[in-house]
Amino acid sequence: MWKYVLGFVVFAALTLWVLSKGGEIDMSGEKHGIEVSPEAAASAASK
């Protein structure tokens, strides 16, 4: 049983590490409507 707990903790730590290395990731859940920050709109327009 302790191996399952250890595996979960290692997997959770690895997941958090990968997410932290991923840059700007929005973890706030679903968003409805159009709410774009000016920085995101400017970078999207320049592409």
Image (tube, grey):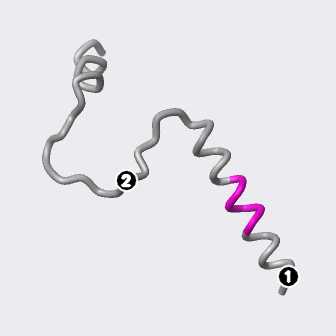
Q: Which label is found at residue 39?
A: none
The Cα atoms of the two marked residues, 1 and 2, are separated by 32 Å
Above or below residue 25? Residue 2 is below
Which of the 4 quarters of the picture holds residue 44? top left
Give the image quarter of residue 22.
top right
Q: Which residues are magenta?
A: 9-14
Q: Is residue 9 left or right of residue 46?
A: right
Mark 1 / mark 2, whichever is N-terminal: 1
Instruction: Categorize mark 2 by other alpha carbons within 10 Å: few (<14), some (14-19), many (20+).
Output: few
Magenta highlight on residue 21: no
- Please, what is the three-letter code of the amino acid marked with disc 2? Ser
Percent across and percent down for residue 5 are: 78, 77
Where's residue 46, x and y in %?
27, 12
Where is residue 28 drawn, in percent x and y?
Answer: 37, 53
Q: Write down the residue under mark 1.
A: 2
Q: Main secondary structure of the magenta part?
A: helix
Q: As shown in the figure, which amino acid type bears the numbered disc 1?
A: Trp
Q: Residue at x 22, y 24 (%)?
A: 38
Rendered residue at 53%/33% (across/down): 23
Q: Which mark is residue 28?
A: 2
Q: Is residue 11 magenta?
A: yes
